[in-house]
Amino acid sequence: MRGEVPEPAQKARMREVQREIRRLCTGTDKQLNKLKKKYADEPRVMATLNEFEPDMENSK
């Protein structure tokens, strides 16, 4: 949903996309931080976790 940008005339679709982004993405930064703390001593897991954007919710 994050990469989807409806045409300006598609107001209903834009509302739907924004609603789903809020529903699905809220809390992801906190979740990622929690996982990084939990798996800090596991390099393979950390390598994967480090591929995610650390401040996803504020990058709009």
Image (cartoon, helix red, strand yellow):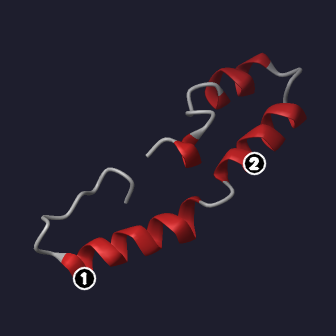
Q: Residue furthest top?
A: 43
The relative height of residue 17 versus residue 33 in the rendered view (above or below) is: below
The relative height of residue 41 versus residue 16 in the rendered view (above or below) is: above
Q: Which residue is mark 2?
A: 30
Q: Nearer the viewer, residue 2 or 59?
A: 59
Q: Is residue 57 left or right of residue 3?
A: right
Q: Residue at x 66, y 20 (%)?
A: 47
Q: CA distance from mark 2 to mark 1?
A: 30 Å
- Element assignment for label 1: helix
Q: Is residue 37 left or right of residue 10?
A: right
Q: Is residue 35 left or right of residue 7?
A: right
Q: Residue at x 74, y 49 (%)?
A: 31
Residue 6 is situated, as x and y percent measured from the top left of the image, at 19, 64
Q: Is residue 43 left or right of residue 21?
A: right
Which quadrant: the N terminus? bottom left
**Circle 2 residues within 10 Å: few <14, some 14–19, many ≥20:** few
Amino acid bearing label 2: Lys
Residue 16 is situated, as x and y percent measured from the top left of the image, at 35, 77
Amino acid bearing label 1: Ala
Q: Nearer the viewer, residue 27 or 48?
A: 27
| Numbered tag placed on residue 49 in the rendering | none
Q: Which of label 2 and label 1 is nearer to you?
A: 1
Q: Which residue is mark 1?
A: 12
- Tell me which corner region of the image, top left, top right, bottom left or bottom right, holds residue 54: top right
**Circle 1 residues within 10 Å: few <14, some 14–19, many ≥20:** few
